[in-house]
Image (cartoon, grey):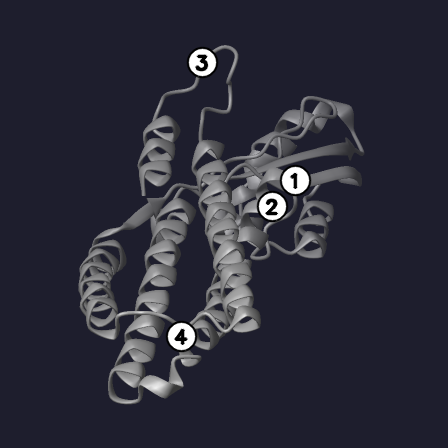
Amino acid sequence: MLISLFSLYIASKPPSQRMSFGFHRAEVLGAFFSVFLIWIVTGVLVVLAILRIINADYKIDATIMAITAGIGVFVNLVMGSLLYFGGHAHSHGGGGHSHHGHAHAQAIQYEILPETSGKHTDSPNINVRAAFIHVLGDLVQSVGVLIAALIIFFKESWAIVDPICTLLFSVIVLCTTVYIMRDALVVLLEGRPNNIEFSRVFTSLEQIKGVKKVHDLRIWALTMDKVAVSVHLEVAQPQNAQSVLRFRR
């Protein structure tokens, strides 16, 4: 949670001469490290669970275990509700730039990049998603511990269910976080967002009146909701380059 809060604070800082795109990717870095931390903790729990099964070490106090897990479930439910219902951020569209004969792709972003046209849409911030998944992971683990504690409380000879539940719910946690890690890596590696089709953008640029050729089209994500575009446009008549700049549909 502290990583997420700090990342959101850094991401809100205005652009500077050195960081001309701003600090928006801080939220993506925060999400990456949050998920990575979850994976480390989960990995440690998996190793400990396997060692307990190998060594047949099942000595636990089911009552204390159940009370602790119950408190964990309650706290994570409250935190998860706050993040889910109050943690949605407004996405702001980012523009793109193209360079060839002083042409700019921004002139047609309203047609070919509707997701980045500057309109406000309700989409969850990736850092909020990571924080929510972090809480969800803790909740899943707490539920697993609670289930194991209740089983052991009524059937002490079944104490092996504790490490088994740890293994089972660890897999669930990993499955719920892999998509956030994938999205974060796409942004950090400057990949194209899934909601923008390369071929559609290319075709739309070719259809601009006066454009002779389109090449060196680059589309990459600055953040989950900010997209940058760079393209070279060759115009049939250089004297009409400014009219291409002002193109709207």
Position of residue 79 measured from the top left corner of the image (x, y, whole percent): 22, 56
**Which mark is first along the chain, 1 or 4?**
4
Residue that label 2 marks: 185
Position of residue 103 measured from the top left corner of the image (x, y, whole percent): 66, 28
Of marks 4 and 1, the one in the foreground: 4
Q: Marks 4 and 2, Cα distance to the nearest angstrom?
A: 34 Å
Q: Which secondary structure lies at badge 2?
A: helix
Q: Residues within 10 Å of mark 4 (few under 14, many from 20)?
A: many
Q: Quadrant of the N terminus?
A: top left
Q: At 61% across and 47% down in the image, what residue appears? A: 186
Q: Which secondary structure lies at badge 3?
A: loop
Q: Which secondary structure lies at badge 1?
A: loop
Residue 83 is left or right of residue 20, and the answer is left
**Which mark is first along the chain, 2 or 3?**
3
Residue 172 is left or right of residue 112, and the answer is left
Identify the image quadrant of residue 143: bottom left
**Which mark is first along the chain, 3 or 1?**
3
- Circles 4, 1 touching at the beta carbon (< 8 Å): no
Residue that label 3 marks: 16
Q: Residues within 10 Å of mark 1 (few under 14, many from 20)?
A: few
**Residue nearer the viewer, 161 or 104:** 161
Q: Marks 1 and 2, Cα distance to the nearest angstrom?
A: 6 Å
- Circles 1, 3 touching at the beta carbon (< 8 Å): no
Q: Residues within 10 Å of mark 2 (few under 14, many from 20)?
A: some
Position of residue 32 measured from the top left corner of the image (x, y, whole percent): 51, 43
Residue that label 4 marks: 162
**Residue nearer the viewer, 109 or 25:** 25
Residue 210 visible, this orientation:
no
Q: Where 94 falls versus 153 (above or below)?
A: above
| Disc ID at residue 189 | 1
Q: Marks 4 and 1, Cα distance to the nearest angstrom?
A: 40 Å
Identify the image quadrant of residue 212: top right
